[in-house]
Image: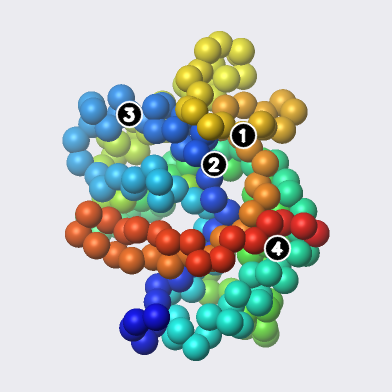
Amino acid sequence: MGGAAWRLFVAVPVPDGVRATLADILEPVRRRVRGGRWQAPETWHLTVRFLGDTPLAALPAIETAVRRTAASRGPFPVELGEAGAFERRRGGRVAWVSLARGEAELAALAAGLAALLAPGQAAQEPFRVHLTIAREAPDELVAAVAAAIAAARQRDRSGAHVSVGLGARPVPPAGGVLAWTADRLVLYRSVLGSAGATHTPLLDVPLTG
C-alpha cells in the first residue's frame, strides 16, 4: 500500500451536475479577479471529519466507523447557501459557500463519526459546514464570489434561467440547481501536489439509516 501514513478525510460528495453549475457561476469571477488559489471543482466536497496523516494500520477501524455512521442516517436534502470567508489568515482568506439546507444533518454525521473514532474526546474546534472555493483569497475575490452566488440564488428563486451542468441529479422539492440529495459518505485519501490536492475515494458507503 506504500507509505507509513495517508492523509485522510471523510466527506459528503458534491454531485457532478451541481459542481458543473457552480463552476459556471464562478467562471466570470475567475476570469475577472486576480489572485487566490482556486480549488478545482472535481475536489469540491463537504467535509464531515478531517483525519490528517493516519497510520495505514488504522484504516480498518476507520472504515468500520464510516460504515456504522452511514448506517445510522438516511439521505437528506442539501442546498448551497451564501458565500463568505474565514477570518483573515496569512496570505489572504479562505472563500467558501455555506449551506442553506442540510447543516444539521451533516453536523449529526460528524458527531456520530467523532463518537466512534475518538470517544470521550472533546471536539478540537466547532464543526463548520462549508464548501471551500479558494484559498489565499484577496478581499476582492471574496466579495465577487459572494455576489455571484447571491445573484445565482436570486435567479433560482425567481424562476429565471440558471445553467445546469450535465449529469445533475434530481433535487428535493423546492430545491434549486445548487441543491441535491446527500446519500453517500465517502472516505478519501488526499495527496498534496504542486498543482493542488488530488482526492481518491477509498470507501463509498450509502446512507441507509
Q: Nearer the viewer, mark 4 or mark 3?
A: 4
Which residue does the numbered mark 2 point to in the structure image?
Answer: 15
Depth order, front residue of 114/84? 114
Where in the figure is residue 203, as x and y percent of width and height? 56, 66
Question: Mark 2 vs mark 1: which is more N-terminal?
Answer: 2
Depth order, front residue of 10/155? 10
Proximity of marks 2 and 3: CB atoms separated by less than 8 Å: no
Proximity of marks 1 and 3: CB atoms separated by less than 8 Å: no
Residue at 40% of width from left, 46% of height from top?
42
Given the image, on which type of amino acid does mark 2 rest?
Pro
Marking on residue 85: none
Where in the figure is residue 34, as x and y percent of width and height? 19, 35
- What is the quadrant of residue 38 in the picture? top left
User: How many residues crowd around disc 1 within 10 Å: few (fewer than 14), some, or many (20 or more)?
Assistant: some
Proximity of marks 2 and 1: CB atoms separated by less than 8 Å: yes
Marking on residue 70: 4
Question: Mark 1 vs mark 4: which is more N-terminal?
Answer: 4
Please tell me whether mark 4 sits on a helix, a strand or a loop. helix
Judged from this view, the residue extending furthest toward the right is 209
Q: Nearer the viewer, mark 1 or mark 3?
A: 1
Which residue does the numbered mark 1 point to in the structure image?
Answer: 169
Judged from this view, the residue extending furthest toward the top is 160
Given the image, on which type of amino acid does mark 4 rest?
Ala
The Cα–Cα distance between marks 4 and 3, rounded to whole angstroms, is 34 Å
Given the image, on which type of amino acid does mark 1 rest?
Arg
Which residue does the numbered mark 3 point to in the structure image?
Answer: 27
Question: Mark 4 vs mark 3: which is more N-terminal?
Answer: 3
The Cα–Cα distance between marks 1 and 3, rounded to whole angstroms, is 22 Å
Query: Which quadrant: the N terminus?
Result: bottom left
Question: Mark 4 vs mark 2: which is more N-terminal?
Answer: 2
User: How many residues crowd around disc 2 within 10 Å: few (fewer than 14), some, or many (20 or more)?
Assistant: some
